[in-house]
Image (spheres, grey):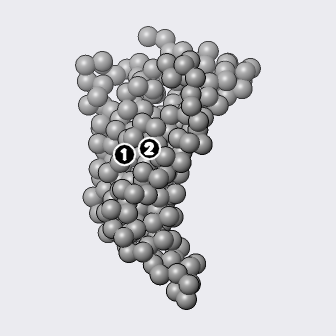
Amino acid sequence: MKDSNPAACSACATKGLCGGKGLVTLKDGVWTVNPLAIQMLGICSALAVTSRLESSLVMGAALIFVCVGSNLFVSLLRQYTPHRIRMIAEVAIIATFVILFDQFLKAFYWDMSKQLGPYVGLIITNCIVMGRAEAFALQNPPVLSIVDGLANGLGYAGGLAIIGLARELLGTGKIFGHTVLLEQWYTPNQLMILAPGAFFTLGVVIAVFNALRGPQDEEENK
């Protein structure tokens, strides 16, 4: 079977990033159909690892790495993967990148690895990563698939960072261990670093995101 990569690369060279599809794909993942605020995917991680900004950023980086890597390899192998075992192949590819990131954390960032616990490993079953591999990378060329993985990873990581920033700042008065809100005039709200604070902050982030995004016309909703 012939691959359509040459035509795709030609389009990239003459019409911008993948014939103009690159910017649309980037905007979709980061903003229009943000995986956290619009699609409501990856909620477990958003609630479990966002008590601190640092852990939120590391989890976001993990998802970006896995989503970009898995999208690339699923796209490269899409012409050679039998349809009936495609999901098994996708899970194997995703698991490989998850293990690589997990081992990197254990080797160079042990404290964070302990803090995140099993949640890095659970990226293997994350709906965002599997969904992009199945719905996008399996039908598109490698370059565009990388853009899609990066866009969705950034969209999700951005949401985690906002939640982590709000929870750590309001819950402890600190950011990255440095005092921002002085105790003389601010009393840390311990509720924000507990489970109810995660639900509340996530709800506020989703509401604000949708308010800024505004109503969508019928063509976009289709």
| Residue holding disc 2 | 36
Residue 166 position, x and y percent, is: 50, 64
Secondary structure, mark 1, is: loop
**Residue sitting farthest toward the top:** 1
Vertically, is 162 above or below 174? Answer: above
Q: Nearer the viewer, residue 14 or 199?
A: 199
| Quadrant in which the N terminus appears | top left
Residue 200 position, x and y percent, is: 39, 57
Q: Is residue 59 visible?
A: no
Residue 64 position, x and y percent, is: 48, 47
Q: Nearer the viewer, residue 77 or 175?
A: 175
Q: Nearer the viewer, residue 101 or 154?
A: 154
Vertically, is 169 above or below 56? Answer: below
Q: Nearer the viewer, residue 26 or 75?
A: 26
| Residue holding disc 1 | 42
- Is there CB contact under 8 Å for labels 1 and 2? yes
The crowd level at tag 2 (other Cα within 10 Å; few <14, some 14-19, many 20+) is many
